[in-house]
Amino acid sequence: MKQRLLGKTPEELREIALAAGLPAFAGKQMAQWLYGKRVRSVEEMTNLSKAGREALARDWEVGYAAPVECQESSDGTKKYLFEAQGFFIEAVMIPDQDRKTLCVSSQAGCKMGCKFCMTGRQGFHGNLSAADILNQFFAIEEAGELSNAVFMGMGEPLDNWEEVKRVLEVLTSPWGLAWSPKRITLSTIGVLPNLRKFLDESHCHLAVSLHNPFPEERLEMMPVQKAWPLEDVVNLIRQYDFTGQRRVSFEYTVFAGWNDTKRHADALLRLLQGLECRVNLIRFHQIPDFPFVPAPLPQMEAFRDRLSRGGITATIRASRGEDIFAACGLLAGKHKGL
Ligand code: SF4
């Protein structure tokens, strides 16, 4: 099976070029073809010698894989299904006025087992490679129009940090897509050791899945609380500067009667006191065989207002793509046979 060039850095491409009998500078040219011109085959890299391209193509391919399926929501959101690592994964393109945001998957399934999440329910099948992740950006119809990316699809990105880091490097390097890190948000439930690496090694925005400020209650829904308690996650975040361009937000899915009370709002205010951040309140999308229901909108508004009065900016996030199961927590890579 051929290896894939997508995700390689110019230094790695240089070594690959040399091994194929091409000059060292061909590495830079290959990076331009891959990330600048976005060619889909080695054959299209026409400033490399024909013999060199043939030698290269014996072991390497660009690595594009067309989506298997695309569903479009009545609100314009599109859900793309890809096959990767022998499993199905999903990416969601969310149009919004002048923006087009891609919500990408970083793993096939997920190990973290959050009870309210369809991805968590299917268990873990494998890490996606950088090529699998970049393919979600490059193989969709809107590839040339994307303005933002959020790592909020299937999987926990910090449980696959090395590959995700490589993708961030391709997205933000001058030799890659040259995006500003401000266009990218990584969402995590708080995998502490890799969270520190992410904060040190990238400048992208951070979103933390919080959902409940009380440790014992959070643990009921999120087993990660045991290994990496929320308090430790917040303490780590406090060591970094979020007063400038980089932002941190906290995701809070609101369940009726479980985490929507004044007691929860006040505990959240205490936990986040003094931290420059925002809280995104997310309406829960009901999933089968799970007893919790979404908090009614007036309750969410009261919760938001209590946080705002306490000095924390809170917003109720609009739900997108619910009719095609593309909304938060609903990605399951569901397809024939799965
Ligand atoms: Fe994994 Fe995120 Fe789902 Fe939790 S919410 S199970 S971390 S995909």
Image (spheres, rainbow, N blue to C red):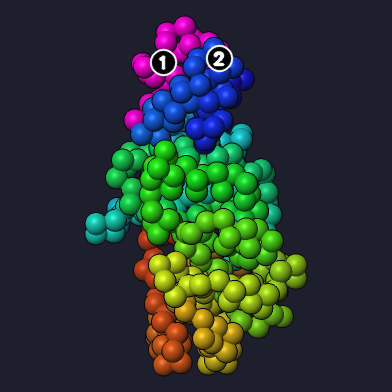
The image's mark for residue 7 is: none
Q: Position of residue 160 (x, y in %)?
A: 63, 49
Rendered position, 14 above or below 116: above
Where residue 99 sits, quadrant-wise, is bottom left
Q: Disc 1 residue type?
A: Leu
User: Mark 2 near ligand 1 (CB under 8 Å)?
Assistant: no
Q: Position of residue 102 (x, y in %)?
A: 40, 51
Q: Which stretch appears magenta?
A: 37-62
Q: How many marks?
A: 2
Name the residue rendered at 62%, 20% in the picture.
1
- Asked if the residues shown at circle 1 and circle 2 are in contact, with their CB atoms under 8 angstroms apart, the answer is no
Where residue 315 sits, quadrant-wise, is bottom left
Q: Disc 2 residue type?
A: Ala
Neighbours of disc 2 within 10 Å: few (<14), some (14-19), many (20+): some
Relative depth, front residue between 71 and 83: 83
Q: Secondary structure at mark 2?
A: loop
Q: Is residue 41 magenta?
A: yes
Residue farthest to the top, as pictured: 51
Q: Secondary structure at mark 1?
A: loop
**Can residue 121 be spotted in the picture?**
no
Q: Position of residue 54 (x, y in %)?
A: 49, 9
Name the residue rendered at 46%, 92% in the picture.
310
The image's mark for residue 20 is: 2
Q: Is residue 10 magenta?
A: no
**Can residue 14 be spotted in the picture?**
yes
Residue farthest to the front, as pictured: 24
Relative depth, front residue between 256 and 218: 218
Neighbours of disc 1 within 10 Å: few (<14), some (14-19), many (20+): some
The residue carrying mark 1 is 48
Residue farthest to the left, as pictured: 97
Rendered position, 31 above or below 252: above
